[in-house]
Every structure is written in C-alpha cells, then in structure tokens.
Amino acid sequence: MAEVVLRTERLVLRGWRDEDLETLVELNSDPEVMRYIGEGKVLDREQSAAALASFRERWAEQGFGLFPVELAETGELTGWVGLNVPRFLPEVMPAVEIGWRLLRRHWGRGIATEAAREVLRFGFEDAGLERVVSICHVDNEPSRHVMEKLGLRQQRLTAVPAHGRPVRVLAISREEYARQG
C-alpha cells in the first residue's frame, strides 16, 4: 500500500520513519503528556519502539492508522494524530477511534484540531468509515474540547476495564460529519 500523506495549511501528516522514534520517546516519557493516557504511566524507549512498530503494522492491516504530524514550515515532528481500533474499551466495539498525542511545547496552538479535522475527513471520505469515536479521561478537558470542535458529541461515561480509569466516549457519524459542511 502506498504511503498516505495528508496536508493542511500548517501541517504534513505522513507515514512513520525510523528516525521518528526519538520524538516518540520524548513524547511518551513526559509525565504531563501521559497523565491521561492508559494508566497514566510514561513509556520507556523499548516500549516506544514497540509502539512505533505496532503503528506501522496497524496501517498495513487496517488501511488507516496514526499519522506523525510535522510542521510544514520546518519539518519538526510535533506528535501524532490518527485513527485506531479502541480494543481497550470492548463496550464500544466495533469502532474506530480518532486520537492525538502532542509534545507539550506544541499544546495550545491548534495543531491537534487542525490535524484531527483532516484525519476525520480522511476517515469518512477516503477510508469509508461510518462512525468515529473519541475517548478521553474524564478530566482531560483540552482533548474533550478538541473533540467537540470536531463535531463529536458525548455518548457515555464509562471506565476502562484494564485499569478502571473513568473515560468519556464521544462520537460522530458520517451523516453528522456531512451536515457540518
């Protein structure tokens, strides 16, 4: 399968490269970035390398996945935004989730929203998805705000079975997306 590359006014969303591991390690080792992810624990280099390998595998298996997000002007990698199957929350399955993780220095600049808008477009128009969910820890207000800007609406409050942390599930259908114009 050919690499999918998406572009926005400020960003390039592309396939994973070996050299992306350094940024992924930085991202996953920041306690503030990771506090609402999974159990809230940081990942080490080995775990980040395994994650990078799994990101590539999921693209090959599913035809969609997580995109590394670069600033178009400088090529600096800011983190990732993309689509994934949220197997960690069986009650929402079958589903495809949109999510993001950015280096802290890139927070508050609209990067997650800009990239996620393009990924949502890709999901509905190119990948043929019928519905997209997004899941965040109940205290993660910045992520919830991005989800709502994208047009997703809360469906339920629940807890992740593996660790019991409370999460919100928001969703948008293809029809709801199309009505947004």
Image (tube, rainbow, N blue to C red):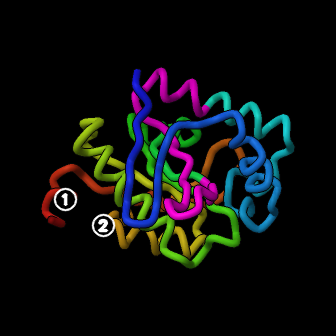
Residue sitting at x 44%, y 51%: 98
First of labels 1, 2 by sequence position: 2
Residue 163 in the magenta stretch? The answer is no
**Residue 48 in picture, x, y percent from top left:** 76, 40
Residue sitting at x 72%, y 39%: 19
Instruction: Say above or below: 52 vs 150.
Output: above
The span picked out in magenta is 55-79
Residue on which disc 2 sits: 151
Q: Viewed as shown, does residue 118 lie left or right of 65?
A: left
Which residue type does callout 2 highlight? Answer: Gly
Judge by depth and name the residue closer to the eye, 99 or 12.
12
Which residue type does callout 1 highlight? Answer: Glu
- CB under 8 Å between discs 1 and 2: yes
Q: Viewed as shown, does residue 79 lie left or right of 168?
A: right
Residue on which disc 1 sits: 176
**Residue 31 in picture, x, y percent from top left:** 81, 63
Question: What is the secondary structure assignment of the residue under circle 2?
Answer: loop
- Farthest residue toward the front? 73
Mark 2, other Cα within 10 Å: few <14 / some 14–19 / many ≥20 = some
Instruction: Say above or below: 150 vs 4.
Output: below
Mark 1, other Cα within 10 Å: few <14 / some 14–19 / many ≥20 = few
Residue sitting at x 61%, y 49%: 160
Residue 62 in the magenta stretch? The answer is yes
